[in-house]
Amino acid sequence: MRERLTYKGHPVPYITAWSGERLPQPRVVLAADGIAFKGSVAANGNAQGRDPSGVLWQRWALRQGDGMPEYSVVHGPRQRRAMRKLLCQVCGGPSDKNEQGYLWLLEDYRGVAGWPEKEVTTHPPVCRACAPVAARLCPHLENKVVAIRAGGVLVDGVHGNLYERGGGLLPVVKEKKVVFSGDWRVRWMFANQLAATLTNVTIVDLPGLGARRRASA
Ligand SMILES: [Zn+2]
């Protein structure tokens, strides 16, 4: 585990955005084959400023620790780094790995047939020391967290706002979703996070995860 950043004595996850990292976002406009930032569309309609696969990314400054933590907001570049390098979402150090694979915390859907094989998640893995912290800090895990090991991790999706042609001159947001690589709709994504598909998944018992529930029961 790496040393965790704190704010007023509370841990602040690696992927949490800080208020000093916000940047103004240019207006999203139509390009020939999708969307682009205003001022980044050539006369022939070609879009500049997207990544090589055509995705338009939300802009962020890299100033971790500047201002106040915004616990409900994910800092895109750090989330994507954590996904690509399989870093712990809380401390930013290596996530935990054993012969069953990397350690992830998921929202518990054990009632759903087939779950959690091929689960798609935007939440990077965790290390052992940070797992209880992540379970406590992530609102979506409250009272329904389950630990899993994934032998296969395919970082193959982008998450954000999917745009479509509106009736007017500007594109409109259709929905918030994950679009996978190879899908033409990536060029219509204003994205902030990467998504991973987890395979070869084993549900594991992780001591200490339920501490909050027991304490509050
Ligand atoms: Zn950690």
Image (cartoon, grey):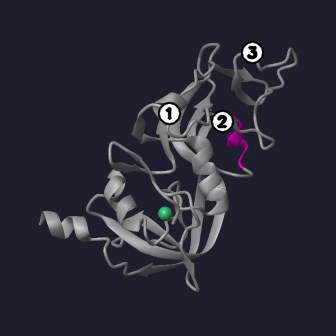
Dot 2 and dot 3 residues touching (CB under 8 Å)? no
Q: Mark 1 points at which residue?
A: 66
Q: For disc 1, does the CB lie below 8 Å from ligand 1?
A: no
Magenta span covers which residues? 183-188
- Element type at mark 3: loop
130 sits to left or right of 216: right
- Relative to 168, does residue 147 appear above or below in the rendering? below
Q: Name the residue under label 2.
A: 57
Q: Callout 3 environment at 10 Å: few (<14), some (14 to 19), or many (20+)?
A: few
Which quadrant does the C terminus fall into? bottom left
Please report whichever mark, 1 or 2, sits nearer to the chain's N-terminal start. Answer: 2
Q: Which amino acid does label 1 sit on?
A: Asp
**Toward which corner of the image does residue 32 lie, by quadrant?**
top right
Answer whether residue 208 is visible to the viewer in this image: yes
Q: Which amino acid does label 3 sit on?
A: Gly
Q: Callout 2 environment at 10 Å: few (<14), some (14 to 19), or many (20+)?
A: many
The residue lying furthest to the bottom in this view is 99
Q: Residue at x 57, y 36 (%)?
A: 63
- Element type at mark 2: strand
Distance (Cα) linking label 3 and label 1 = 29 Å
